[in-house]
Amino acid sequence: MNLLIIIFGALIFIVIAIAKFKIHPFITLILAAIMIGFLMDLEGVVILDKISEGFGETLSSIGIIIGFGAILGTFLEKSGGTITIAKYLLLLIGDKKSPLAINLTGMLVSIPVFCDSAFIILSSLNKAISKKTGISVAIFAVALSTGLYVSHVFVPPTPGPLAAAAALEADLGLVVLMGLAIALPTAFSGYLWAVKFGTKLVENIPKIHEEEVITENKANILVVLLPILMPIFLIGLRSMIKYPSHTIGDGMVADTLAFIGHPVPALFIGMLLALLLVDKKISTKERWSWVSSALKEAGVILLITGAGGAFGSILRSGNLGELIGDQFTASEIGIFLPFTLAALLKTAQGSSTVAIITAATIISPMMDVLGIDSELSRALTVLAIGAGAITVSHMNDSYFWVVSQFSQMDTKTTLKMHTMATLIQGIVAILLISCLQIILE
């Protein structure tokens, strides 16, 4: 019970440090790990060893993947690929259903591109379509924000679910495949809320006096989509090959597919395909500056992820799973505990990535006592944590302000539209995940 009090105190410390005092999550998580270590009466040397061990093990499994994913996303963004995807879906679905096209665009684009960056890129397109169709820009804003959010929390190589999969030792291919299956209806629920509620806000259409300048890539849509879809296909194929009941043997073909389907080669292939989208007029120097920019952005995520691993390493040294086993073994709470924990962390401190990493490191030692330690359950637990990390985005979330400011919505409107949409998405997602668990297990 003392350890549970210590963990609860550490969570309060993390939330207050990040939300109130604006201390960087990397520093906060390391300080929390040290604090818990001393409160558990661990020696200073042991605490430092555990922190280094957890930090190193986490980054050894996902560090390269996050780096390649960041480069892939940056090149897709800078080359105009994101705009091309949006315009293609708009042409395919039509003006009347243009919010749905924007919603699906968000879901696709946010697999390699961070959701806040993608929203900023596509917000000009939102305004241009709003002006053309007369549909409230609030509808487009929420359709886009909710579409972007689902891939951000459910589909690797986005850092949050990638880090959670590593912490929980979940099969990445299963997380990708089931993440996409959950992301699509969850994104659609955000679209439905945007259309139903946003029709009351037609008066909030911004007055756009100038035509928006939108840069797009002139390549074929299949070429633009390949950097996103190819890594997903290869990683999913590897999981099917390695799955015991669907193996194709141990020959050279299986070995080759298993190799290129590993996340590192798969993301490297996706990154190379993204390079092909760049206009030949762009100088080599500028291209390398894009790589540097991507790696700088990835560096912050890597440090937070590694700090989460260090925090988890300290927690595991305290036999947390055994202590919590008596509390939850009979309750059959299962995946609802990781969902609730992630939702509380998300709502309290704002960052989905921090909520996912922190929740995953806390849940990791108790997988067996919660009855969610099978290969399938581990993947579903990653998604349950992601569902919690959507719930809810409000004023302490930087993404909330990106959506608000780039859509010219006031705070009250953004709370009604975006915040309520993320609440609905979180509930829809955890219900879908629990149904999936019942069907598959």
Image (cartoon, rainbow, N blue to C red):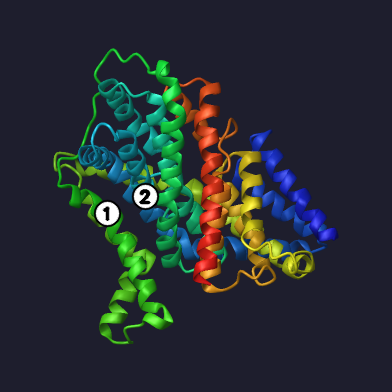
Task: Tell me where residue 94 appears, x and y as whole percent.
Answer: 23, 36
98 vs 316, nearest the viewer: 98
Q: CA distance from mark 2 to mark 1?
A: 9 Å
In this rendering, is residue 255 above or below 370? below
- Residue 169, image quadrant: bottom right
The image's mark for residue 112 is 2
Q: Position of residue 217 (x, y in %)?
A: 19, 40
Q: For the residues labelled 2 and 1, say whether their Cβ atoms are less than 8 Å apart.
A: yes
Q: Around disc 1, counting alpha carbons within 10 Å, would you say few (fewer than 14), some (14 to 19), or many (20 or more)?
A: many
231 horizontally vs 300: left or right: left
* Figure quadrant of residue 321: bottom right
| Residue 141 occupies quadrant | top left
Residue 406 visible within the image: no
- At 76% from the left edge and 61% from the top edge, which residue is drawn? 44
Residue displayed at 34% across by 49% down: 71
Asked whether 97 or 407 is in front, the reply is 97
What residue type is disc 1 on? Answer: Pro
Closest to the observer, 427 or 258 = 427
| Residue bearing mark 1 | 227
Relative side of 401 to 239, left or right: right
Q: Residue at x 85, y 59 (%)?
A: 2
Number of residues whose C-alpha sits closer than 10 Å to that of mark 2, classed few (under 14), some (14–19) or many (20 or more)? many
- Locate the N terminus and report the quarter of the image it occupies: bottom right
Q: Amino acid under label 2?
A: Pro
Q: Secondary structure at mark 2?
A: loop
Q: Position of residue 219 (x, y in %)?
A: 15, 45
Q: Is residue 103 visible?
A: yes
What residue is at 15 percent from the left and 40 percent from the top?
A: 218
Residue 358: mark:
none
Query: Which secondary structure lies at badge 1?
Result: helix
